[in-house]
Image (tube, grey):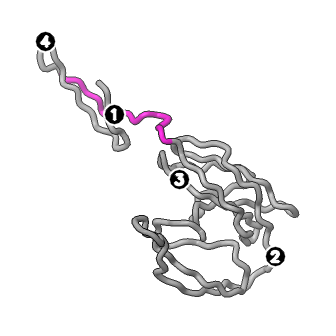
Amino acid sequence: SLGWTSLTSARVGGLAPATDHEIQLYRHNQCGPGSAELVGSTSATTTAGDPARPAAPTGLTVTGRTDTTISLAWTAPAGPPPDRYAVYEGSTRVAVSVDTTVTVQRLFHATWHRFTIAALDSAGNESTHSPAVSAGTETCLSSPPRPVGLTATALSPSSVRLGWTFDATATSYTV
């Protein structure tokens, strides 16, 4: 399983060249037993290419997290060093790194993510994916949402009217 996605397409890497593959698509029902229901299947044959691929990275770990980022580190595979690494969340490539560390950015706070890493050689051949690691972003915002366009208008000698544009990530403000 490559994990769930809300997208309408996915890239599956790490497959052997010139081989047939059966692909199945499931819909997850979060409201009942037997949460996965098969909704479609197809087959695909990868194109011919160099059968030598980089070995898969190992030891994928979460090294840090904030409300919008998750930092990852892994061990390079044995043998010749890969040209770069592809970082996947489920089946979606979310980052590329030349080092054995990366910080995935622009994540929503209080959300869970499942990452794998694949090694890439200079021709773009991709290794199998590392075992997955899951992590959640922090639930509290590191920087509280700030109102935009704060104004104050005098209404009388003893009162003012305050106005601002509400930030969509804020739940309330204290005056």
The image quarter in which residue 116 lies: bottom right
Q: Earlier in the sequence, mark 1 or mark 2?
A: 2
What residue sits 58% from the left and 72% below the top? 11
Dot 2 corresponds to which residue? 52
Where disc 2 sits, the SS reads loop
On the rendered structure, is 29 left or right of 58? left
Amino acid at dot 4? Pro
Residue placed furthest toward the front: 33
Question: Residue 140, relative to residue 50: is it above or below?
Answer: above
Up-down relation of residue 39 to residue 107 (above or below): below
Q: Which residue is mark 1?
A: 147
Residue in the picture at 29% in, 24% down: 175
Which residue lies under the disc numbered 4?
A: 157
* Extent of the magenta region: 139-153
Name the spot of residue 30 as percent of width and height, x first.
43, 65
Q: Which residue is mark 3?
A: 112
Disc 1 from disc 4: Cα separation: 26 Å
Residue 117, percent across and down? Answer: 69, 60
Name the quadrant containing residue 88. bottom right
Instruction: Report, in whole angstroms, how far the alpha carbon at label 3 lies from the one at label 4.
Output: 52 Å
Q: Earlier in the sequence, mark 3 or mark 1?
A: 3
Name above or below for residue 51 compared with residue 108.
Answer: below
Q: CA distance from mark 2 to mark 4?
A: 81 Å
Q: Amino acid at mark 2?
A: Ala
User: Do labels 1 and 2 touch, CB within 8 Å?
Assistant: no
Chief SS of the magenta region: loop
Which circle's residue, 1 or 4, is located before the other in the chain? 1
